[in-house]
Amino acid sequence: MRANVENLAVRLAGVISSWRPVEAVCLGEHSENDLLDPYFALVMDAYHRGGPPSVAERRAAIAASFGDPGAFESSQAGTKDRFFIEEVPVRVEYKSVERFDEILVKGAAAAWADKEAGTYMFYRLQNSRVLFKRSAWVEEARAKLLGLGGDFWVALRTSFVTKMEHFLSDLGAAAMRDDDFFFAQSASGFARSAASALFMSNRRFEPSPRAVGGQIGSLASLPGDFAGRWETFLRTDVGLSKAQKYELAQLIAKSVLILG
């Protein structure tokens, strides 16, 4: 990371960590990219107990240290802030320690697996760089992640396989109807669910969707002929019809199921 961005990250972590509810501040992996990388952003996670300050308080604190942040916006739930500082795109997410602890204690809860979109939040907790910690909570949470049992991974894999099969069915229907929009939507859902199932089979948390393509090929266990089929399915310039892409998706799905 360039020195000025590193300095900005440290200064921003200092502002966030001054809020008493904040337990830890971590820097996401995309923050380590070169500034010219299209995926670059200063991504920070603020783990808190009981809730972060209000959106207005957060914006005022940032403005007091850096000047008025550009294009400041917060999610409807008030858990994500997006803004610019010195033309650097910044993303700050506020995450409940209590929520993480609840999920980690439940571990293999199938009900949780059915409700959650994926394990990226665990990936970030496991792989982000710690800039501030008020206690040993981060180390303890990471140790619990390493200790998750087989039931946890099986429950998640089952959930993603089910989603993959639903999207595959939708893909086939869209191909038959020659529905461009629904086909594209179903193809996206199928690809994401199939990839998630493979990460779960390998007992690895999923990275950001921006990093899945670069990491999926490094998984220790993959179906035979997966790489070629996967690349062909994702490409838009191979001249395959919707019906042919659906047939390819069926082969991918079958290989994912066989892998177990």
Image: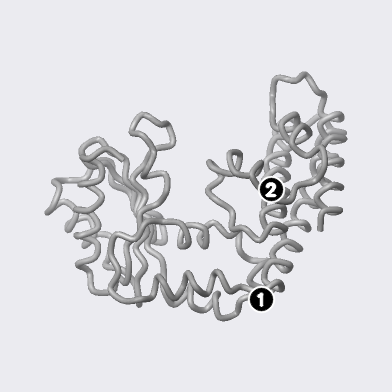
- Would you say 141 lies left or right of 154 here? left
- Looking at the picture, tell me which residue is in the foreground, 11 or 89: 11
The residue pinned by badge 2 equals: 195
Q: State the SS at label 1.
A: loop
Relative image position of residue 259 (x, y in whole percent): 82, 54
* Rendered view: 166 above or below 234: below
Relative image position of residue 112 (x, y in whole percent): 63, 71
Colour setup of the view: one colour
Relative image position of residue 201 (x, y in whole percent): 72, 58
The residue pinned by badge 1 equals: 109
* Rendered view: 231 above or below 91: above
Residue 173's tag is none
Q: Quadrant of residue 77?
A: bottom left
Q: Amino acid at mark 2?
A: Ala
- Looking at the picture, tell me which residue is in the foreground, 73 or 257: 257
Relative image position of residue 185 (x, y in whole percent): 68, 39
Task: Answer few, some or many: residues within 10 Å of disc 1's Cα (few below 14, many 20 plus, some between 14 and 19).
Answer: some
- Looking at the picture, tell me which residue is in the foreground, 55 or 67: 67
Q: Amino acid at mark 1?
A: Ala
Asked whether the viewer can see residue 161, the reply is yes
The CA span between labels 2 and 1 is 21 Å
* Rendered view: 149 above or below 128: below
Quadrant that contains the C terminus: bottom right
* Rendered view: 256 above or below 136: above
Q: State the SS at label 2.
A: helix
Residue depicted at x 37% and y 49%? 43
- Would you say 109 lies left or right of 39 here? right
Q: Earlier in the sequence, mark 2 or mark 1?
A: 1
Quadrant that contains the N terminus: top left
Residue depicted at x 80% and y 44%? 170
